[in-house]
Image: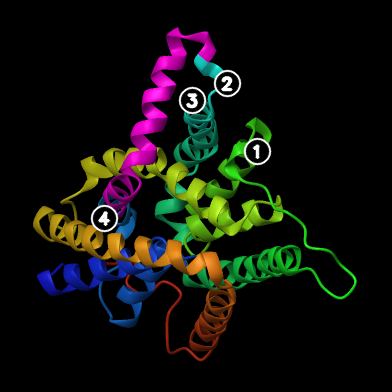
């Protein structure tokens, strides 16, 4: 991998990690369209450490408060009803599904799941799900001629059941094209949470999963055509760009709909199927050398 490729892929990772359009799919597609080697699951997981570092800094006050309350709750029973302490446990519980499934399906994640036809399918299907969830949220928030405004849930109402559902939604992102934020936000909206609450828990829930995945893949970094230098460079780029995207996205979702992302996902999925059907793009483009 050249330094230019690592710069572009780091930029793509930072731009797409927090948007509901799938960063892993876009890394795969960028390489395929540019006729580069597939950067691989290890490169993707490690560059995500950069974007998660951006999450740690952006939500540093929330994270410090949650960690502090969680540790105090271990020895102080009165702290166990504290919302921040409960959030600590809920993040742990919600991380179990992706941890178990990630290890179980490791070979598939690094192989068959990177087929562009599967990515096209997941882009479209999850896009439609996100669109439905967004419409339901908008209906509750605005009401209608014959419908009163319905108050949506905040994170203070999050319990073990919903935490696990969020976790299973996040685990769906093991398949490129699904999108970690897209799946968890869609799940949150369908369970009745506000856009802001679903997005915030999505970002917090991703921290242990992404960091663990990145550390786990460190042993495979530097193998094949991807060396350590470009991987670290791409990770730094992803961090800088990712921080800016988080700040923008958290403001965007308070007043705007997810429909632009829904339309983009569906059109990109259709374009992929057309290009593959016409023989312009191979469903395994770049894989052989990746």
* Residue 55 against residue 219 in the figure, above or below: below
Measure the alpha-carbon separation of dots 1 and 3.
Answer: 14 Å
Reply yes or no: does residue 215 show up in magenta.
Answer: no
Location of the C terminus (image quadrant) = bottom left
102 or 165: nearer the viewer: 165
Q: Residues within 10 Å of mark 2 (few under 14, many from 20)?
A: few
Dot 3 and dot 4 residues touching (CB under 8 Å): no
42 or 195: nearer the viewer: 195
Disc 2 element: helix
On the image, the x and y values in percent for residue 142 come to 73, 69
Tag of residue 47? 4
Residue 74 occupies which quadrant of the picture? top left
For the stretch drawn in magenta, the main secondary structure is helix
Residue at the disc numbered 3 = 85
Residue at the disc numbered 1 = 157
Reply yes or no: does residue 58 show up in magenta.
Answer: yes
* Residue 284 against residue 77 in the figure, above or below: below
């Amino acid at each position: 991998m050249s330094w230019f490729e690592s710069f572009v892929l780091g930029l793509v990772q930072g731009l797409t990690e927090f948007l509901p359009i799938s960063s892993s799919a876009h890394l795969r597609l960028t390489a395929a369209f540019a006729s580069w080697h597939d950067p691989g699951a290890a490169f993707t997981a490690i560059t995500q450490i950069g974007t998660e570092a951006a999450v740690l800094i952006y939500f540093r006050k929330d994270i410090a408060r949650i960690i502090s309350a969680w540790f105090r709750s271990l020895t102080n029973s009165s702290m166990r009803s504290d919302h921040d302490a409960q959030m600590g446990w809920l993040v742990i519980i919600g991380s179990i599904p992706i941890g178990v499934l990630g290890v179980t399906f490791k070979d598939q994640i690094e192989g068959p799941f990177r087929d562009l036809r599967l990515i096209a399918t997941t882009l479209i299907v999850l896009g439609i799900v996100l669109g439905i969830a967004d419409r339901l949220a908008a209906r509750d928030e605005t009401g209608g001629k014959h419908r009163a405004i319905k108050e949506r849930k905040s994170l203070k109402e999050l319990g073990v059941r919903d935490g696990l559902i969020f976790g299973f939604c996040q685990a769906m992102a093991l398949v490129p094209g699904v999108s970690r934020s897209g799946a968890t936000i869609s799940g949150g909206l369908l369970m009745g949470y506000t856009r802001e609450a679903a997005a915030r828990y999505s970002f917090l829930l991703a921290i242990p999963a992404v960091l663990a995945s990145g550390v786990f893949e460190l042993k495979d970094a530097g193998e094949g055509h991807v060396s350590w230098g470009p991987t670290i460079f791409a990770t730094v780029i992803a961090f800088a760009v990712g921080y800016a995207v988080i700040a923008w996205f958290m403001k965007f979702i308070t007043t705007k709909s997810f429909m632009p992302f829904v339309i983009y996902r569906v059109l990109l999925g259709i374009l992929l199927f057309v290009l593959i059907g016409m023989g312009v793009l191979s469903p395994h483009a770049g894989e052989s050398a990746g």
